[in-house]
Amino acid sequence: MNRDIRLNHELEMQIKELQQREERVLADDIAAQKKAEVALKDSEERFRILFNQAPLGYQSLDEEGRLIEVNTAWTETLGYRREEVIGRWFGDFLAPEFIDAFRKRFPIFKSDGKIHSEFEMIHKNGERRFIAFIGRIGYQPDGTFKQTHCILSDITVQRQNQELLKQKYAELARFNAVAVGRELRMIELKLEVNELCMRLGEPPRHKIAAVPHASGALSGEPQ
């Protein structure tokens, strides 16, 4: 009888100790889970701040080319609110002449996994903006398409300056052609005067410098 009591007591003690261990393990698991949740929340908050305060625009498209995410820089660049663009087809924001190009390039982008391109987009106020894109494809764990990840930068001012530079070079080329033409005519006249002087037995009246050439005068002009 005493032996059975002792065995029951030992069994109860072992069960109690096992329960205490389980409680400690559970408490440790809960603490670890809470710690992981806090770390995840902090990480998500840092990502959110970085995402929204990034100086360059970001957008993500689904497999059909619809916008599923944009950051603050994107909305500021094109003048829209986030809720005005999420779910809409990316082509809705392109200049009309660039829509077909997007239709053709998007499948290639998904196939190649990356892209570096430029499109002309329409600001909410109707202005046109030249936008440069660098993008990569995000994949599911099984390797299928998940979404695009694209960084975009507004190169409108750069494009405008490039166009202005071309115009200035063209203007300079026209002016140079006129100036060279006038100088050549002056040389021809001086040569004619010298020839007449020689016919009259007089010394030449004009010293003729090297004949200028228009070619190469604008060698710094961009191609």
Image (spheres, helix red, strand yellow):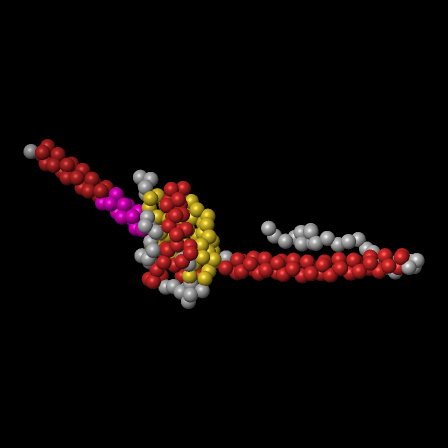
Residue lying furthest front:
199
Image coords of residue 139 (percent x, y): 35, 43
Residue lying furthest right:
201
**Residue at figure coordinates x 27%, y 48% from the top left:** 30
**Screen quadrant of the N terminus:** top left
**Residue at figure coordinates x 39%, y 48% from the top left:** 104
Residue 108 position by quadrant: top left
Residue 58 position by quadrant: bottom left
Q: 5 left or right of 211?
A: left
Q: Is residue 105 on the magenta stretch?
A: no
Image coords of residue 217 (percent x, y): 69, 54
Instruction: Specify the segment rendered in magenta.
Output: 23-37
Q: Is residue 25 on the magenta stretch?
A: yes
59 and 169: which is toward the camera: 169
Q: 192 left or right of 58?
A: right
On the question of residue 196 being in view, the answer is yes
* Dominant SS in magenta: helix
Residue lying furthest bottom:
125
103 and 71: which is toward the camera: 103
39 and 45: which is toward the camera: 45
Q: 128 left or right of 31?
A: right
Residue 12 position by quadrant: top left
**Residue at figure coordinates x 37%, y 55% from the top left:** 91
On the question of residue 165 being in view, the answer is no
Image coords of residue 178 (percent x, y): 69, 61
170 and 10: which is toward the camera: 170
Total numbered circles: 0
Image coords of residue 159 (percent x, y): 53, 58
**Residue at figure coordinates x 33%, y 46% from the top left:** 146
